[in-house]
Image (tube, rainbow, N blue to C red):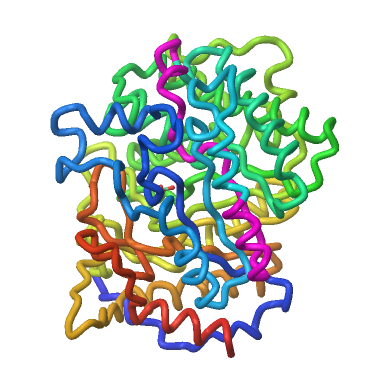
Amino acid sequence: MLMQTRNQATVLSKDFPTDFIWGVATSSFQIEGATQADGRGLSVWDVFCKQPHAIADGSNGDVACDHYHRLEADLDLIACLGVNAYRFSISWPRVQPLGQGDWNEAGFEFYGRLMEGLITRGIQVHVTLNHWDLPQALQEQGGWANRSTCAHFVRYALEMNKRFGRHITSLCTHNEPWVMAILGHELGVFAPGLKDRKIAMQAAHHLLLSHGMALRDLRLAGAPMALGIVLNLSPIYPASDSPNDIAKAKLDDGLNARWYLDPLFKASYPGDVLEHLGSDAPVVLPGDLDTIAQPLDYLGVNYYTRNFSSSGNPWDVHSTGNEVTDMGWEVYPQGLTELLCRLHQDYPVKHLRVTENGAAFRDEMVDGAVNDERRESYLREHILATRRARELGVPVDAYFAWSLMDNFEWASGYEKRFGLVHVDYATQKRTLKRSAHWYQQFLKA
Ligand code: FCB
C-alpha cells in the first residue's frame, strides 16, 4: 500500500471564526497527584493501581504532575500558550470523599482557585464531572453498575453548579462512557478492573442515564453553562470486502458508537446491538431512554485514530504504511473529517467539539529542548482536518489538544507522553516542547 504523504498545507487560526474555542485538556487523576491531601477520598483508580500488573510501569497517581501543589505556575503555563479555553476534570472524591454525604471544603477551595485563576487570565472554564475517578466508596456499593450511583452523581453535579455555575463555560457529564464501561468492566484493563460483559453493559446504561438525569436537573436548576457529554469515537472500516468483515465493522460501530449516540439523540438503543447482546443487554426501565435523550448543547468528540474490524486475524496497524504513534495508533487525520461529517449527517447535533486530539511519541530531551516534530505535524494535520469539516458545513466550534502536559497515561503509566509540555517527573520541571511553541505561534498569528 501507498505510504501516506504528509499534508504540508499550512493552517492559520484566522481560517477559523474569532470565537472558535482553542484549548488544551487534562484530567484530574492524570495530573493532580496529592491523592492523600486535604481530605480527598479514594478513587477507583487509586485502588486499581495497587493491583499487581495493572499499570505497565507499576506506577500510580500519587504524585503525577503534582498539579495540586503547583496550580499557580501551571495556570501561567496554560496562559502562556495563548489558548482561550482549558478543559479539565473535577476529582469527585476530592470534593465528596465518599461520593455521598459530606462535602470536602478543601476540595472546592482548590477548584475555586483553579477556575478563578483561569478567568483572571481570560481563559474559559470547560469542566468534566467524571473523567473516570469514581469515589471508591461508591464502587464498593457496585459503582456504575448500581443504579443508585446515578442519583449520587446528580447531587454532585447540582452542587458543582451551585458553587461554580457562574464560572463555568461548559460542563461535560462523562468523559468516554465506552472506556469506563468496557475497558473497566468487561475487559478489566482499566479501573475498576472487572471482567463481566453484563455488568459492563449495565454500567454503560447507568452512565448514560445519569448523564440525562443530571442535564434535566441542571436545567431545572437554571444552570447557565453549555451542557454536553464527551464520547471516544473513531470511524471503523472493514479490514476487507468480505461480508464477514463488513458485518463485523457494522457491529463494532454499533457497540462503540451507536450504542451511545442513538440513545442520546434518538432515545433508543440500536436493535442490531441489542440482538447481539442477548442476555447481556442491560435492564432499562420505562422512561430511561427519554431521560437520556435530553437536548445537548454540544457533543464532545475525542479522536485519536481510525479502527479496522476483521472477523479473522486481528488488523495489523502497520499494513497501511501510515505513521503509527507510541500507543500503536495509526495517524489518520482524514478520519477526523469523516467522523465529524458522519455525526453531523446522522444525528441532530447542534455543536460538535473536538475535546481531545493528540499523540504519544518517544520524546527526547536534548540540550533542554524537545524537538517533537511528529507531534507538531499531528496537531497541524488534525486542525486542518477540523477546518475541512467546517468547510463541508459541519458545526465544529472547538478544538482541544490532548494534553497540556505529559501525565499519568492510565494503564500505560508514565511511559507514554502526550504532552505539549514535557514533564521531568524527578524534578517536576515543565519544558515547552516544539509542538507547544508551534501551537503558541499558530494561536498568535
Ligand atoms: C483518552 C482519555 C484521556 C487520555 C487519552 C490519551 O481516551 O480520555 O484521558 O488518556 O485518551
| Quarter residue 284 falls in | top right
Q: Quadrant of residue 264?
A: top right
* Front-lying residue, 90 or 289: 90
- Note whether residue 251 is visible: no
Please give the count of numbered marks on the rendered protein.
0
Q: Is residue 170 left or right of residue 220?
A: left
The magenta stretch is 113-142
Percent coordinates x, y for residue 312 in the rendering = 22, 38
Q: Position of residue 407 (x, y in %)?
A: 33, 55
Q: Is residue 136 in the magenta section? A: yes
Residue at point 41% right, 53% down?
Answer: 69
Q: Is residue 143 above or below residue 318?
A: above
- Residue sitting at x 56%, y 69%: 386
Q: Position of residue 391 (x, y in %)?
A: 66, 74
Quadrant location of the C terminus in the rendered image? bottom right
Q: Position of residue 347 (x, y in %)?
A: 68, 46
Vertical comparison of 210 with 8: above or below: above
Q: Is residue 410 magenta?
A: no
The answer to whether residue 170 is visible is yes
Instruction: Quadrant for residue 13, please give it.
Output: bottom right
Point 55% across, 22% down: residue? 205
